[in-house]
Image (cartoon, helix red, strand yellow):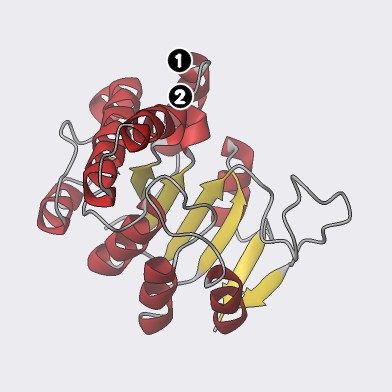
Amino acid sequence: MARRMAVKLSGRVFGPDAAACLAEWAETLAGLEGIQPMVVAGGGSIARHYIGAARSLGADEATLDQMGIQASRLNARLLVSALGGKAYPEVPATLSEVSRAAESGLVVVAGGLYPGQSTNGTAALIAERVGAEMFLNATDVDGVYDSDPRADANAKMFGSIRVGDLREMLVREETVAGGYDLMDLVALKVIERSSIPTRIMRATPANLRNAIGGAPVGTEITF
């Protein structure tokens, strides 16, 4: 049986140039020899657009979560289309559905599953459920920094960080719908309790291949 890898794919991948970008990602994901990717698509700008508009109209956070989930599932369907016959044809909506899809041996692509949970948390739970050897969080920065690299030119990236230290950083972050970034507390709890090897890295096909090959890409979360 192929080794399973959980991959959270940044919503940025599904942006304005999605067609060309997703074609490259599909080729990479389908070409990982001996690997069955379990991919979770982020909601990206589409989710933020609808969440922002609905929030301004007075929608509650649970409703906003549902909108984010629906946007991420739409992104997932786009990647399924790019993968063609290499992908499981449906987008799972529960962990049980993910498990059944995994038995196909095909690339499985999901979006969000449950309200109150980021797609990072979803990817961690999927990694745990299917026994993934690794969780790769492919995001829009190179790894975990000691401050926001988009705002601080002197921010320094960690080659590795202990899960407890990352948790302390995250408790200061907002946890409203559409506000998740590198990780969330649900994801950290899951990878810690099941000791899932995890890396946070920039979302590029080359980084994915290198990380699976054992290269020290991005930031490793240690226990």
Question: Seen from this angle, which residue lies furthest right?
Answer: 154
For label 1, the crowd category at 10 Å Cα-Cα, with few meaning under 14, some 14 to 19 and many 20 or more, is: some
Where residue 33 sits, quadrant-wise, is: top left
Quadrant of the drawing holding the N terminus: bottom left
> Disc 2 residue type?
Leu
Residue contact between numbered discs 2 and 1, judged by CB atoms under 8 Å: yes
Say which residue label 2 marks: 22
**In terms of secondary structure, where does tag 2 sit?**
helix
Which residue is at a point 46% across and 20% down the rendered structure image? 23
**Image vertical order of residue 168 relative to residue 208, above or below:** below
Q: Which of the pair 27/67 is nearer the observer?
A: 67
The percent coordinates of residue 143 (x first, y second) are: 67, 56
Where residue 206 sits, quadrant-wise, is: top right
The percent coordinates of residue 87 (x first, y second) are: 26, 33
Q: Which of the pair 213/108 is nearer the observer?
A: 108
The answer to whether residue 3 shows anywhere in this view is no
**In terms of secondary structure, where does tag 1 sit?**
helix
Horizontally, residue 149 falls left or right of residue 32, namely right
Quadrant of the drawing holding the C terminus: bottom right
Horizontally, residue 213 falls left or right of residue 8, namely right
Q: Which of the pair 34/112 is nearer the observer?
A: 112
The answer to whether residue 192 shows anywhere in this view is yes
The percent coordinates of residue 104 (x first, y second) are: 16, 45
Horizontally, residue 189 falls left or right of residue 114, namely right
Which residue is at a point 10% across and 58% down the rendered structure image? 96
The percent coordinates of residue 130 (x first, y second) are: 25, 63
For label 2, the crowd category at 10 Å Cα-Cα, with few meaning under 14, some 14 to 19 and many 20 or more, is: many
> Disc 1 residue type?
Ala
Say which residue label 1 marks: 19
Which residue is at a point 66% across and 46% down the rendered structure image? 141
**Image vertical order of residue 175 relative to residue 222, above or below:** above
